[in-house]
């Protein structure tokens, strides 16, 4: 019994990054993306006020009632997802809490993501209390986008901290004199993507899908002008991605960066096609839903891409930690390829063979 308890504690509270942390990093990112999808379904089905108050569903009930119909089930189901996100966030934080000395970045990301869940719950409540005010809805969505981006960064760093092959392929100092160019393009991609998502919330807040069939406040922007404004950072993001991918193939940059830049470009082309389709066809619900999921994917893929660009363009580690790309050997690797104690980088700790952004 004691051995079993120790095994459970060792899994939930690992001292070395491994498969459990990597799985939870993926779960954290995908769970927050799922919240974007369910929140979009709430809005697109006119269920935003299916539960007309918060934190209760009605003044007399914590849950929806049959009299509230399908809208009550949809909105209350979306609220229940918060508990799933909270459970995933707690498990992810526990998986990093014992790593805080040697992997401060992993610990910090899991802490911020965990704190983001109650913030999102409160923002959801304010959204309901303000009658689906489009400014609040926009903030609610932007917080989700930030949490998805953090989850994507956590995926990258948990893999790099626990898999020797990944740490080698994404080691610092691989782009030489192109370091400034790589980082400048990475910054351009990050800023452009943020503006794309934010201006997208203004377009949505101006459009017809308010989230409820009754009278709901909308932005008073000119729909044509705000859509044109939304397209400007999209063009910048596409141009920046094409230039980065061209340089990555020509130079070449490390394969992980090239692959993600290709994925990002493909995603942008699909998103652009869906965006133009929904604009010229009167914003059909299915197209809007697909575009919404694409926005969540854009947050994740852009964050992964930029994080890897900064990782491989960091100043190379010198001295003893430079031997074998910062690892003392492979004898300590787990069966799944995880980095064991014998593989921890000498001197500064496993999480520090690349700079923290």
Image (cartoon, rainbow, N blue to C red):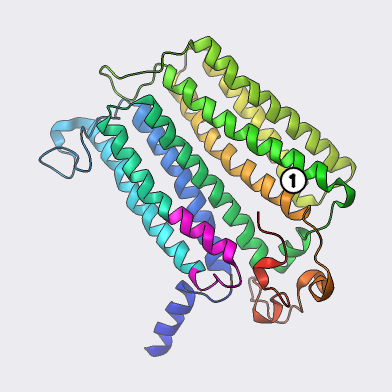
Residue nearest the observer in this picture, 271 or 307: 307
Question: Where is 250 relative to 88, above or below?
Answer: above
Q: Residue at x 58, y 65 (%)?
A: 104
Q: Residue at x 49, y 20 (%)?
A: 203
Locate residue 165, reporting x and y percent.
74, 65
Residue 216 in which image quadrant = top left
Question: In the rendered structure, which segment of residues is drawn in magenta?
Answer: 97-114
Q: Position of residue 312 (x, y in %)?
A: 77, 54
Q: Position of residue 299 (x, y in %)?
A: 57, 40
Q: Nearer the viewer, residue 283 or 136?
A: 136
Magenta stretch holds residue 130: no
Q: Element at badge 1?
A: helix
- Name the residue nearer the viewer: 100 or 294: 100
What residue is pinned by disc 1? Answer: 259
As drawn, is 310 to the left or to the right of 273?
right
- Residue pushed farthest bottom? 2
Seen as rendered, the residue at the extreme left is: 60
């Amino acid at each position: 019994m004691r051995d079993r308890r120790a095994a459970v504690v060792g899994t939930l509270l690992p001292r070395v990054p491994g498969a459990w942390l990597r799985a939870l990093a993926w779960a954290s990112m995908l769970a927050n993306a799922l919240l974007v999808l369910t929140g979009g379904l709430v809005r697109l089905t006119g269920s935003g006020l299916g539960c007309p108050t918060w934190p209760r569903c009605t003044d007399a009930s914590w849950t929806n009632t049959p009299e509230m119909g399908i809208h009550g089930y949809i909105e209350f189901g979306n609220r229940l997802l918060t508990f799933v996100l909270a459970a995933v966030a707690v498990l992810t934080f526990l998986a990093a809490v014992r790593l805080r000395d040697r992997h401060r970045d992993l610990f910090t990301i899991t802490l911020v993501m965990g704190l983001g869940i109650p913030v999102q719950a409160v923002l959801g409540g304010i959204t309901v209390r303000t009658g689906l005010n489009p400014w609040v809805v926009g903030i609610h969505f932007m917080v989700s986008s930030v949490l998805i981006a953090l989850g994507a960064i956590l995926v990258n760093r948990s893999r790099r901290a626990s898999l020797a092959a990944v740490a080698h392929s994404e080691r610092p100092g691989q782009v030489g004199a192109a370091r400034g160019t790589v980082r400048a393009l990475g910054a351009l991609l990050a800023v452009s993507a943020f503006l794309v998502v934010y201006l997208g919330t203004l377009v949505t807040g101006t459009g017809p899908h308010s989230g409820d069939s009754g009278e709901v406040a909308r932005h008073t922007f000119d729909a044509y002008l705000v859509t044109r404004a939304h397209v400007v950072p999209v063009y910048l993001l596409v141009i920046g991605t094409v230039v980065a991918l061209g340089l990555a193939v020509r130079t070449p940059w490390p394969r992980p960066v090239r692959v993600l830049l290709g994925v990002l470009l493909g995603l942008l082309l699909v998103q652009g096609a869906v965006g133009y389709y929904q604009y010229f066809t009167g914003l059909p619900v299915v197209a809007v839903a697909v575009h919404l999921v694409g926005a969540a994917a854009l947050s994740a893929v852009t964050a992964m891409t930029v994080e890897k660009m900064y990782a491989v363009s960091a100043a190379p580690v010198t001295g003893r930690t430079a031997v074998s790309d910062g690892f003392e050997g492979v004898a300590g690797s787990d069966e799944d390829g995880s980095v064991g104690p014998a593989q921890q980088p000498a001197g500064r700790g496993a999480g520090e063979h690349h700079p923290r952004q």
